[in-house]
Image (tube, helix red, strand yellow):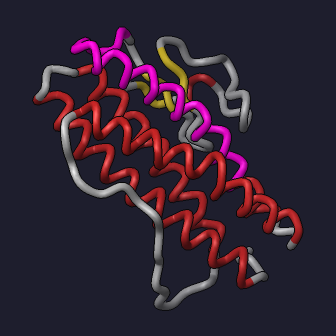
Amino acid sequence: MAVKNAMTADFLRSAYGGESAAHMRYLIWGDMAEKEGFPNIKRLFYAIAYAEQAHATNHFKELGEQVGPATVTCGAEFGAGKTVDNLQGAIDGERHEVEQMYPVYLNAAEFQNEKGAQRAFHFALEAEKIHVKLFEDAQKSAREGKDINIQKVYICPICGYTVVDNAPDVCPVCGAKKEMFKEF
């Protein structure tokens, strides 16, 4: 079922664009981190890129039957610098989503009674909160010239929930089982 309200549809398209851009940006920045000697930061970038893909997929699916051309404008960090700088770009982008974008989008979807969009925005918001912290920790290590100390990163393919080292038995955001989590 497609969304019925134009504002929510516009927000879904905008969020789709932002998450799609973040997905690609994190893959590029991950490769750069590896070249600088940060293989675990690369793993973190790649894992979170997968979470961003899950978010983009959810937003795209919620648009449902709304087919046709659309200009999608999204705010995004552009450019590539040293890993410390790229992590700052990631932190800034994720904070924007947590503090400004998703709360407004979620509020509009709730007001317009768009249940699917509410779910998609909620899933993304909860994951992005985690991403901010993980990127901040990674940046702290990179500033000291050290890689982060992680073994694995697990991503829920349904909602993008992100956890380091051990996946939960059940995703605390969407209820997906541990076996569904993708390991990086």
Q: Residue at x 19, y 43 (%)?
A: 81
In the displayed structure, 134 sits above or below 98; it is above
The image quadrant of residue 130 is top right
Q: Residue at x 29, y 40 (%)?
A: 86
Q: Quadrant of the N terminus?
A: bottom right
- Foreground pick, 8 / 157: 8
Q: Position of residue 34 (x, y in %)?
A: 17, 28
Q: Residue furthest bottom?
A: 68
- Foreground pick, 143 / 57: 143
The reply, left or right, for residue 65 in relation to residue 77 is right
Q: Residue furthest left?
A: 35
Q: Quadrant of the C terminus?
A: top left
The reply, left or right, for residue 53 in relation to residue 112 is left
Q: Is residue 122 magenta?
A: yes
In the displayed structure, 39 sits above or below 26; it is above
- Foreground pick, 110 / 183: 110
Question: What's the magenta region?
Answer: 121-149
In the displayed structure, 142 sits above or below 28; it is above
- Foreground pick, 120 / 89: 89
Q: Residue at x 46, y 85 (%)?
A: 71
The image quadrant of residue 149 is top left
The reply, left or right, for residue 167 in relation to residue 172 is left
Q: Position of residue 119 (x, y in %)?
A: 74, 53
Q: Position of residue 20 (x, y in %)?
A: 42, 59
Q: Residue at x 43, y 30 (%)?
A: 135
- Counting the numbered discs, the total is 0
